[in-house]
Image (cartoon, rainbow, N blue to C red):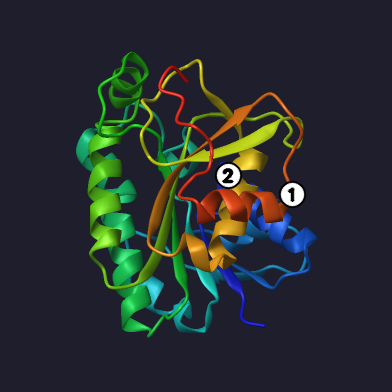
């Protein structure tokens, strides 16, 4: 079985994706700027390749052509490796937008034929107080998200874009996971556990119905769904009723 590849898999949702894929018994490859540090953070058995999204040559050596799916989970974090909040907007765009462009082009050049999974944010095209706050912290975050989404959609690759609500670092599996069309504003009232976001993205990576589809993901009270139930939501373009007040 060809490996799943995670770019940005040592922190946040990317790390959750790595852990869950390993738990499922899937082969996993992680592209990391510092393989030595990554080895201490990632589960045993993960194939770690050196690569930096700001260095196209390093990405061309990552072996993307062999991968079943690529998850682009790169984000600006709280200072890790010098990529923290409140950095200049140009520097943030180099990582979050141009990094996506570099990864897509490396995948295209390697003859990648799997699905490119992009982790994005809910409501980047709609004004909201929460969006304005994140734009101030993360240097035009929503513009970078919109531009990334558009670049991937026009890349010629098979793609799927999951737009998460406000992400929470607590455990997953304690609520229902709701998937809808991409219609919601970003709101502090609408949350999503990182492990649940990771799970929805993993299901979407293998579901034919998620091909070339963008969708919103958030938690609602209820019983955690099965993978089959998540696939059914994706099949219907997000089966849940859009929650504009989310």
Q: How many marks?
A: 2
Estimate the x, y position of residue 163 in percent, counting from the top left. Answer: 43, 41
Q: Secondary structure at mark 2?
A: helix
Q: Residue tagged by mark 2? A: 13
Q: Are marks 2 and 1 in contact (CB under 8 Å)?
A: no
Figure check: 83 above or below 192: below
**Image quadrant where residue 120 sits:** top left
Towards the viewer: 36 or 15:
15
Describe residue 29's horizontal placement relative to residue 224 as left or right: left
* Picture disc at residue 175: none
Describe residue 149's horizontal placement relative to residue 70 as left or right: left
* Picture disc at residue 226: 1
Q: Check the picture and name the quadrant holding the N terminus.
A: bottom right
Figure check: 197 above or below 45: above
Figure check: 26 above or below 89: below
For the point 40% across and 34% down, which residue is it?
A: 122
Q: Residues within 10 Å of mark 2 (few under 14, many from 20)?
A: many
Estimate the x, y position of residue 78 in percent, counting from the top left. Answer: 48, 31
């Amino acid at each position: 079985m060809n490996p799943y590849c995670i770019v940005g898999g040592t922190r946040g949702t990317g790390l959750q994706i790595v852990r869950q894929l390993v738990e499922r018994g899937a082969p996993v490859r992680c592209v990391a700027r510092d393989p030595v540090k990554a080895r201490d953070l990632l589960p045993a058995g993960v194939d770690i390749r050196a690569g930096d999204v700001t260095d196209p040559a390093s990405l061309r050596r990552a072996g993307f052509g062999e991968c079943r799916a690529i998850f682009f989970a790169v984000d600006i974090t709280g200072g890790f490796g010098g990529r923290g909040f409140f950095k200049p907007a140009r520097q943030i765009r180099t990582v979050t937008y141009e990094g996506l462009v570099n990864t897509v082009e490396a995948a295209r050049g390697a003859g990648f034929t799997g699905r490119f999974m992009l982790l994005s944010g809910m409501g980047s095209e709609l004004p909201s107080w929460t969006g304005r706050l994140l734009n101030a912290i993360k240097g035009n975050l929503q513009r970078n998200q919109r531009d990334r989404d558009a670049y991937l959609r026009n890349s010629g690759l098979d793609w799927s874009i999951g737009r998460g609500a406000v992400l929470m670092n607590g455990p997953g599996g304690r609520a229902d996971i709701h998937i809808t069309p991409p219609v919601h504003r970003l709101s502090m009232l609408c949350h999503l556990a990182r492990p649940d976001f990771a799970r929805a993205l993993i299901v979407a990576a293998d579901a034919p119905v998620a091909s070339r589809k963008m969708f919103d993901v958030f938690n609602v009270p209820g019983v955690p769904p099965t993978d089959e139930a998540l696939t059914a939501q994706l099949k219907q373009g997000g089966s849940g009723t859009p929650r504009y007040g989310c």
